[in-house]
Structures are given as C-alpha cells and as structure tokens.
Image: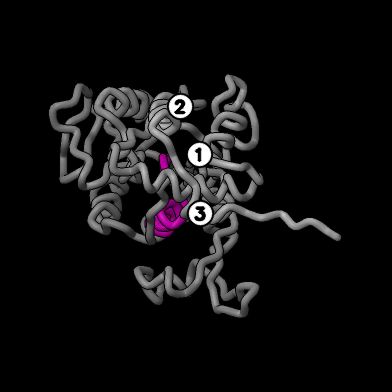
Amino acid sequence: MTSATISTPTEAIVLNDKDFHFIRDLLRRKVGIDLSDDKRELVRSRLAKRVRALGCTSLKSYVDTHIRPTTAAEKPEFTHFIDALSTNLTSFFREPVHFDFLRKTVLPNVLRSKRTVRGWCCACSTGEEPYSLAMTLLETADQSHDIRLLATDISTKVLAEAVNGVYPLKRLTNVSTHLRGKYFEPRRLPDGTSALAATPTMRSLITFRRLNLMDRLPFRGPLDFAFCRNVMIYFDRPTREALVGRISAVLAPGGYLFTGHSESLSGQSHALTQVAPAVYRKSP
C-alpha cells in the first residue's frame, strides 16, 4: 500500500501573534517593509503557499525551521520568503505625467549638455516601468547618445519576468500602437495566447539586478534621474529618509528623483527641491 502526502488546506494554516511579530520585525530590519497589524491575513495567506510547498506541518514550523535561524538570510528559502511578501503592482506608463515631465523637461537639458544618459528604476517589478523609460528615452534621444538604465528589485521572481520581457496583449493597453509596433515583437505564450516581447534594441539599454534598497548602493552614479515610485509607502519615516539620502548621493548635480504621488517627502530631511508633483531635484 502506498502512502500519500496530505497537504494542509491554506485556510487551516494559523499565524500566531509571536510569529507575526517576528516576521514583521524581520521585514522591517532586512528590507524596510513596515507592515501594519491589518496585513496579518495577507502574510498568513501568502506564506501558507510556502508552508505547503515545503511540506511543513504548520506556519510555525516553517518560521522556526526556515526563517528564524540566524543563517536563514543566507539560504535560498529566504529569497522565496521575501518574494512571497513583496507587493508588485505595476503597469506600462503608470502615472504618465512623470514620463511627460521626463520627456519634456529632464531629457532636453541632459541631451543638450552631454552624450550620455544614465537612469535608475529602483523597484522595477515585472519590468513595465523600465521598458516604459526605455521607450521614452529612445523616442527623445538620437542614436549618438549612449543610454543606460539600471533596473533593480528585491524579488527574484519578478526580475525573471522583467528579464524575459514578454507580456500578454492586455498588459500593453497603455502603450500606443506606434510604440508597440516599434519596440515589441509578436510572441505566443505556452497556452497559445498572443503576446508581445521587448525588442533586443530596447533590452540592450537595461541592466536588471537584484538589490535590497536597505543595503549600501553598489554604484556611485552619477545618475541623471531615478524612479523610486510606489515603494516607499511600505517604509517607515526613518527608512524613507535614509533611502532618499542614498539616492540623492548618486544623483548628478541637477539630477531628478521621481516618487509615487502618494509618497510626499514633505517634513522629511533631505537635500532635494520639489519641482513638480512627486518630482524632486538635486541642486545643480
């Protein structure tokens, strides 16, 4: 008689107070995410999938075995843990006023003064934002300009999607027919669904890397602009101030920081000047 593994239903997996507080404190220390008490069910439901995948008997055993040990952050499961609890909502040309400002205000000044353009997408998720930036740059600059974009995220799962650069048609509704025809190629997904893939020309501008924004930045810049949008809403004030300071340090004189429209830097300590809604500039 063969035995079968019986998996625990997701709804039967319990997250106790001690483990929730441990997870919340760990996320704040390691990656800056500041979870409120009302996120407890979200944490439970997302980690329940890892509990089942690893065959753990409970969420407590998962935390005690794979997350709580002091060496956990050095093991592969910690990456899955962060992937599970990271929120990755994005779209092409999200908050389009920022791309208009980049095209009309930032890039003309940069392109007049030098032949290089350097930008950073701090939390690139599945790639829609850096590809939107690449299209904006390619449509504004000419072939004589050297354009380089760095796109980073803490989640290896979404980075893999970004590097792949293949999207179902429904995810490109914000991309004009002109841009789709110029910067994407037809593809078929495994299920036969029509999709579009970023062209090699556009891909060549972007370097994708995993990066924890809480760590020391592994580059010095100088950058002409940085998009750090809709990520600081998950951070507490000291974490936001420290991150803005690190970004400011790698901006070129006169460089720009774009934040999400719900992420005002008002009342925070920084050396930038607000020049438009959710757009800040370093002194030139």
Residue indicated by mark 2? 30
- Picture quadrant of residue 142: bottom left
Give the residue type at disc 3.
Answer: Thr
Q: Residue at x 86, y 60 (%)?
A: 1
- Nearest the viewer among 267 and 61 is 61
Give the residue type at disc 1.
Answer: Ile
Per the model, the C-alpha gap separating discs 3 and 2 is: 26 Å
Q: Do the numbered discs 3 and 1 sit on residues whose CB atoms are within 8 Å? A: no
Mark 3: give few (<14), some (14-19) or many (20+) Cα within 10 Å: some
Q: Residue at x 58, y 35 (%)?
A: 61
Per the model, the C-alpha gap separating discs 3 and 1 is: 19 Å
Image: 165 above or below 258 = below
- Nearest the viewer among 136 and 86 is 86
Q: State the extent of the magenta-drawn residues as a range.
A: 120-138
Q: Residue at x 56, y 67 (%)?
A: 197
Q: Secondary structure at mark 3?
A: helix
Residue indicated by mark 1? 82
State which tag comes first along the sequence, 2 or 1.
Answer: 2
Residue indicated by mark 3? 10
Mark 2: give few (<14), some (14-19) or many (20+) Cα within 10 Å: some
* Label 3 vs label 2, nearer the camera: 3
Q: Residue 94 in the image: x percent, y percent?
A: 31, 58
